[in-house]
Image (tube, grey):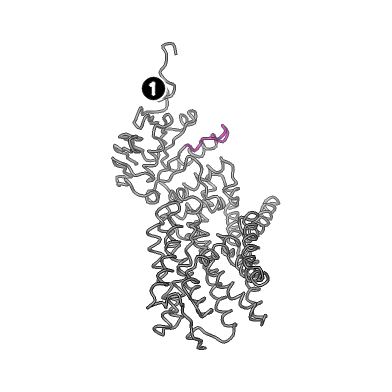
Amino acid sequence: MKISSNNNNSLFKYNNILSHSNVFEFVFIIGLIALPMLISNSYYRDWFVMAFIMAGASCAWNIIGGYAGMLSIGHAAFFGIGAYTSTLLYVRVGISPWLGLIAGALLSTIAAIVIGRATLRLKGTFFVLVTIAFCEVLRFTAIGWRSLTFGSMGITLVFKKNFFNMMWQGKTAYVLLTFGYLVFVYVFNKIIEKKKFGYYLVAIREDQDAACACGIPAAKIKTIGLMISAFLTSIGGSIYAQYVMYIEPDVVFDIMISVQLILIGILGGKGKAFGPIMGAIIIIPLSSFLRGSLANLSGLHGFVYGVALVLVIIFIPEGVYGRLYRFFNKNKKNIKNHVEGVM
Amino acid sequence: MIEVVNVTKRFGGLVAVNKMNIVVEKSEILGLIGPNGAGKTTLFNCIAGYFKVDDGLIKLDKKNITNLSSEEICKNGIARTFQAAKPFGDLTVRENIMVGAFNHTRKTKHAIEEAESCMEITGISHLANDTSKDLTLCDKKKMEICRALATKPKYILFDEVMAGLNPTEVQEIIILLRKLNSSGIGLVIIEHIMSAIMSISHRIIVMQDGALLAEGDPSYIASHPSVIEAYLGKGKEYA
């Protein structure tokens, strides 16, 4: 009897939704949406919209890159597929970006299946290399296939205010849309984190042999992870295209997009649902601010940005939120030990 | 019953396992010993699906499981531990064991309950919230045993589960293994600590150069001349 009551107690603690870290995350997110709604300056609002898109896409990257530890340096491929599919469907056929976004996401998922089947059975660097190569292939295809994609000229969207066109006057609607996207991906991560699938991804990252010995079909789980990740990243790409209203191959298929998604994830704390949000809210304004304030010395902003990142990676390798999370959890554990000691 | 029939495994020109025949009866403790390089771990890896065998058959309860992948072997009811402990370092002990329990359930709640009861059995409940990479070697090994147990196996293969432990810890593991065995799980144990393997095994198989050298109960093995020779070299007349 005593044992079972003990068990219930620890079960309750384990599933505690009101843990310090969850409360922190919730408050932070409320703050995130409150700020741009209160600020009317559209320059700062632009920071938030970009940070929300990149945070959402980085959360999506986190599923395969963070939880499963498969370093994809080609996520711009899915971002670009999303951007180009929705935009081309809209410009060429007149299909609403709302539907184009789903079409792009499905195309990205198919691409993920191909990459996954080809590389995820193998260990080592094959996956990383193939993701880079795949993204480059798409970039050159988008440049070369002018009759479809307008090549390097890119595609400029003509502004026609309409919900159906996913275009609005002012930034408020975009803030809400991108925030909605971010929250969707974040909550999705938060849910799988405590599900069989999430645990399987982490187990594969930590030790694939041991994971297989526990009955985990590693290649299959990783492929599904990549599919979900691609699906969600692609939606970010579509929204990005509708917000910026101009896309070209060298922007959306650029490896810098991939690198930025990874940096946001690593700086914020990969393998934690909230990590990329923290990362984006630091990196996007920082890079934008540095570019503005160090404009007279060209290249200096990149240098400062790089140094800042190196310092973070040296001193807090688990990421800013990774460190905070540990802090919250340590407190919780101390309290628990204390309670047990008293009992 | 695990049946290993004429299994051969080659690495290039080297025959690591040569036409081995083993039968593991339901709920027995089978010791597997032999000098370094005898092919014990290779044989384990063949049974557990980590290596493809070049020749021969492996059957579990009459079902052919030869060359299935390791996760399918686990699904069929053979769990294993590794020579070097392989915890999922960033996860807590409870979460590690939940990963094992997910082998037979989809629900997180069931997995937690299963993990709690397995931790109860293995006596590591007090470590539940600790990060597994910070554990001592002995606790890591116990956690691995617990994780294997959580997959609900019919058999567990232990690869040098007592290596590197002090005598008190070895005793704890022996008690734990007996406990698992008495609950009906068949155990196959590779071990170099002779006192441990002799006291715990019902039956012992000795391998040398990939082949069967001797088979029998512990006292028979301990006095078997060719086993002594394999371990200590050829005896002098006066030895």
Tell whether B136 sits left or right of B227.
right
Q: Residue furthest front?
A: A297
Residue B98: x and y in percent read: 50, 54
Residue found at x 29% / y 42%? B57
Give residue B132's position: percent from left, percent from top: 57, 48
* Residue found 39% across the figure and 34% down from its top: B39
Q: Is residue A243 magenta?
A: no
Q: Where is residue B79 drawn, in percent x and y?
A: 42, 46
Name the residue type under label 1.
His
Q: Is residue B162 in the magenta section?
A: yes
Q: Nearer the viewer, residue A284 or B224?
A: A284
On screen, residue A292 above or below A205: below
Residue at 54% across, 62% down: A262
Q: Which residue is mark 1?
A: B224
Q: Residues within 10 Å of mark 1 (few under 14, many from 20)?
A: some
Q: Which residues are magenta?
A: B160-171
Front-most of B14 and A219?
Answer: B14
